[in-house]
Structure formats: structure tokens, C-alpha cells
Amino acid sequence: MPAQAKVITIAELADYLRVHRSTLYRLLKKGQLPGFKIGSDWRFNVEAIDKWRMQQGAALDEISASESQALRS
């Protein structure tokens, strides 16, 4: 039997990411955070969140590299 994906609540995600819940709701409203609703409650797959975090980090690295190159020019 395959292992089930770990799903967490918004409060648990706020603790996991060390951000305020209002930050998460803002990201959800903009469609920038992977999550799904069960009724009126948001739920998050931890694997999807970890993948999203990696993508965010890669995007920040690209921005930093672009800014550094612009400063050298």
C-alpha cells in the first residue's frame, strides 16, 4: 500500500514556514501558494509546499544574479 501524502492545515503551515497566517491567506488570494479547500478550510500537501519553496528559492537566485549582473554593467 502506498504511503499517503501528509496534509496540513493553515495553522500548521504557518508554523512550518514561520510566517503569519495572514501572509498565507494573501498568497492564496493571489494564487501563489499551492493548496486546496475542503469546505471552507484550506489544506496543504507538504510535498507540494516543499517543491514550491524550492521554486521560490530558485526564482530568488535568478533575480539576485540578474541584479548583480546589472550592477556590474
Image (spheres, rainbow, N blue to C red):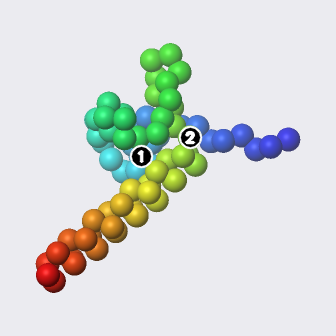
Q: Residues within 10 Å of mark 2 (few under 14, many from 20)?
A: some
Q: Residue at x 22, y 78 (%)?
A: 69
Image position, residue 16 (x, y; %): 45, 49
Image position, residue 40 (x, y; %): 45, 17
Q: Is residue 24 visible?
A: no
Q: Is residue 7 left or right of residue 56?
A: right
Residue sticking out furthest to the top: 39
- The kind of residue on which mark 1 rests is Asp
Residue 70 falls in which quadrant of the image? bottom left
Image position, residue 50 (x, y; %): 51, 53
Foreground pick, 16 / 5: 5
Q: Which mark is residue 15?
A: 1
Q: Is residue 6 left or right of residue 69?
A: right
Numbered disc in front, either 2 or 1:
2
Q: Residue at x 29, y 40 (%)?
A: 23
Q: Which residue is mark 2?
A: 45
